[in-house]
Image (cartoon, rainbow, N blue to C red):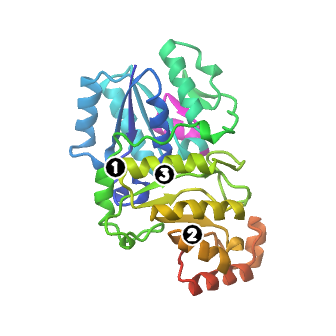
Amino acid sequence: MKILLLIPTDSTERHRESAIPIGIAYINAVLRTMDVDVITCNMLFLNESPEKYLRRVILEEKVDVVCCGGTTYSYRSIKTVFAYAKMLNHRIITIGGGPGYTAQPELFSKMTNADYAVLGEGEETIRELITSLKNGQDVSNVKGIIYKQGDRYVITPERPLIQNLDEIPFPNYEGMGVEEYFTALKEYEDSTHFDYGEVESPRVLPILFGRSCPYQCKFCFHTIGNKYRCRSLDDFFRELDYLVKTYQITGVIIVDEFFGVNRKVIEEFCDRIKSYDLRWFAEVRVDIVNDDILKILKEAGCINLLIGIESICDTVLADMQKHITPTKIESALKCMYKNAVRISG
């Protein structure tokens, strides 16, 4: 079985951190541990038209499965990829994935005309789905998918969350245009997450320590489950060692929904990352911000924090179940200004 895994094209994404989605990199890693042939392409960095690329690869490589996914923002691109693939070979199998499908499984699947879609965490699901398709088995036994059955879509039971994140392969960036992405970052001046002027050569990749968030604010949609789970620090730093050795990175973006659940873990994390001399970014809640923790973060190379302000109105914050107050927000902002920590909100 030959699989084509695609990051959808979008001209506005070329100079953004999301140009290399870590979710697709995780799927790339899992597929490459299986007995299948995988071609991965970041369509943001193509040197030819998407149509020309798809025609050449699908026909010449005799692709059996096309996988593509993303947020609702990527809807048109995903729909175009699947439609063109079907035009080239009506027997080709299309598989979607990502927040768009997880948020609205049936609607998004219909809109993109996907044959199958992976919902929620994808690592175990894509392995089982591809195995079932390869062996001609009944996919109704695969948890965590939606699939086309005649003129309707069927959703299988939800898949349990992965409990031991250390067992998941590290994200694989082969075929995802890492060097082109690093080049594009030199032109990127309007970042929410990272001040690329801080490093002479911005070679920055995403990395994930924990999944989901222990808080349940009403406005937030957790695409990979509502239960917070984190990797061991040993596993995190093994991946960091791999990124430094393989890509000579100068910085990382910690893409956790919320970094810093436990103060002891923050302190150990900062103590260990300090020796790498990297610049990094993380998201935190206002109620963990104080002089001591900011000093620890800055000394470890943290150059920017994103804090969840959301509103400065008591009533709105209470309705959101945010469990913070305008007073706490103002206190955190003053503390960050005083300590010269760059703020995203």
Q: Residues within 10 Å of mark 1 (few under 14, many from 20)?
A: some
Of the residues shown, which amino acid type is indicated by label 1?
Val
Where does the image place residue 117, in percent across and percent down from the top left? Answer: 53, 33
How far apart in space, not on screen, are marks 3 and 1 (Cα)? 16 Å
Q: Is residue 255 left or right of residue 314?
A: left
Q: Which residue is mark 1?
A: 178
- Determine if the magenta segment contains residue 97: no
Query: Between 24 and 312, which is closer to the camera in this rendering?
Result: 24
Residue 157: quadrant of the picture:
top right
Q: What segment carries the magenta color? A: 103-118
Q: Amino acid at mark 2?
A: Leu
**To which quarter of the image does residue 51 belong?**
top left
Q: Position of residue 66 (x, y in %)?
A: 40, 30
Residue 255 drawn above or below residue 62: below
Kind of element beneath mark 2: strand
Determine the residue positioned at 74% across, 66% down. 320
Pick whichever of labels 3 and 1 is earlier in the sequence: 1
Of the image marks 2 and 1, the number of the one nearer the N terminus: 1
Q: Count up the numbered dots.
A: 3
The residue that mark 2 highlights is 306
Mark 1 element type: helix
Residue shown at 33% from the left, 40% from the top: 175
Residue at x 48% of width, y 51% of height: 240
Q: Nearer the viewer, mark 2 or mark 3?
A: 3
Above or below, comparing residue 149 to residue 245 in the picture:
above
Q: Which residue is mark 3?
A: 240
Quadrant that contains the C terminus:
bottom right
* Mark before the other along the chain sequence, 2 or 3: 3
Which element is circle 3 on?
A: helix
Q: Is residue 113 magenta?
A: yes
Of all residues, the one furthest to the front in this rendering is 275
Residue 259 in sight: no
